[in-house]
Amino acid sequence: MASVTLKNIKKIYPHAQKQKKKKGEPEKKSNLKITDKGVIAVEDFNLEIADKEFIVLVGPSGCGKSTTLRMVAGLEEISEGDLLIDGVRVNDVSPKDRDIAMVFQSYALYPHMTVYDNMAFSLKMRKLPKEEIDQKVREAAEILDITQYLDRKPKALSGGQRQRVAIGRAIVRNPKVFLMDEPLSNLDAKLRNQMRAEIIKLRQKIDTTFIYVTHDQTEAMTLGDRIVIMRDGVVQQIGTPQEVFDHPANKFVAGFIGMPQMNFYDAELVKEDGKYAVVLDGAKVFLSDDKQANLAKKDVQPQSVTLGVRPEHLLLKGDAGQMIKGKVDVSEMMGSAIHLHVDACGQDSIMIVQMNDIHDENLDFSIGAPVSFTFRGKNVNIFDKETELNLEF
């Protein structure tokens, strides 16, 4: 168990010799910052990870999350900044001496070895007594429910079983810090859900510090004590899953966290009798008291804004004079809810309608049917149109 501190961590890849683009080859696009020193893959990364905390780094492909994890592991050199484990600077300490264990996306098992030998390999290299090795391997196998597979080779196992073996190989080392790089991305949806639950249970059993990388925001929200959202090498927000869901720092975080994605509209922030309201398609909705206070504290002026409303917060009922009109484009029955794609305000809006909330038998959700909706003033986010920052914070 250990605390981990990343101070002003930066990763710069030196400029490579530019290769001539082949005819017909698409141009590769990147929003990473380019300087005289090279391409900045991770910029000014600061994070204090407490002992036994579960931290999840999440973001789209190429955002720098795996690069950050590999710097913690010692597999990538840190260009600038300091990495401390339990208060000791380890920038120049070799990976094997950092007392960490890493689980890779590809399992990285030895195909010619049995499950037992795969899990015991690192312990044998450390020349531990056979009895101790056997005890550690069997304890880890029991935790992961793979005791019955110890004599099998990886090719005889399913993807989920192989991933358990890879995790078991890391557990036996009893590391200070447990690193996991997209360990579930090779599994199908059902197995991913099962393994996610297993990792939650595992965390309670082995009680160590976890740093977990994923591009899947569902994994981030369900696993992490705190999540770190990254984009183009830069940290966008750090907070608990509930904090980043309820109070996204900017439009990118708001759109990345939540499924289906948040709806965004061009709207007007106005002020009447000292009270803030948003106007969208002629509908005026006054904001909740806490949002009034946040905007007033920052002395936010009336202006054109980007309004964010989550699909579950769009309502079919409200003041008739404050309803936004649209028409149904697509209706998706999801069992307990209907996902409506509505053409409104000149764009596609997604609305989640719970079946239990439908009391009007005359409601028509067929394609092309007219539909009206609104939202409550407590369930909106207001972003600056230029900076895309949340105007409340």
Image (tube, rainbow, N blue to C red):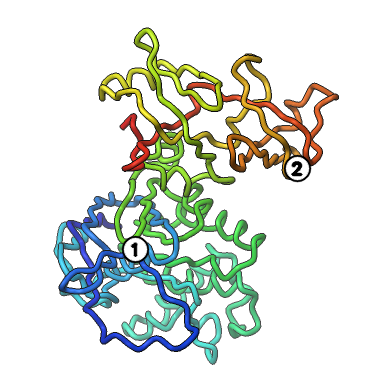
Could you tell me which quadrant the C terminus lies in?
top left
Dot 2: element:
strand
**Residue beneath disc 2:** 331
Q: Position of residue 41 (x, y in %)?
A: 29, 67
Query: Can residue 334 be seen in this snapshot?
Result: no
Q: Position of residue 11 (x, y in %)?
A: 23, 68
Relative to 34, say whether 363 is above or below.
Answer: above
Q: At 21% from the left edge and 64% from the top edge, which residue is drawn?
A: 10
Residue in front for this viewpoint, 119 or 45: 45
Of the numbered discs in the image, which one, if any, rests on residue 104? none
**Residue beneath disc 1:** 31
What amino acid type should be assigned to the residue bearing mark 2? Ser
Relative to 86, say whether 335 is above or below.
Answer: above
What amino acid type should be assigned to the residue bearing mark 1? Asn
- Residue 145 falls in which quadrant of the image? bottom right
Q: CA distance from mark 2 to mark 1?
A: 36 Å
Q: At 40% from the left edge and 33% from the top edge, which residue is drawn?
A: 305
Answer few, some or many: residues within 10 Å of disc 1's Cα (few below 14, many 20 plus, some between 14 and 19): few
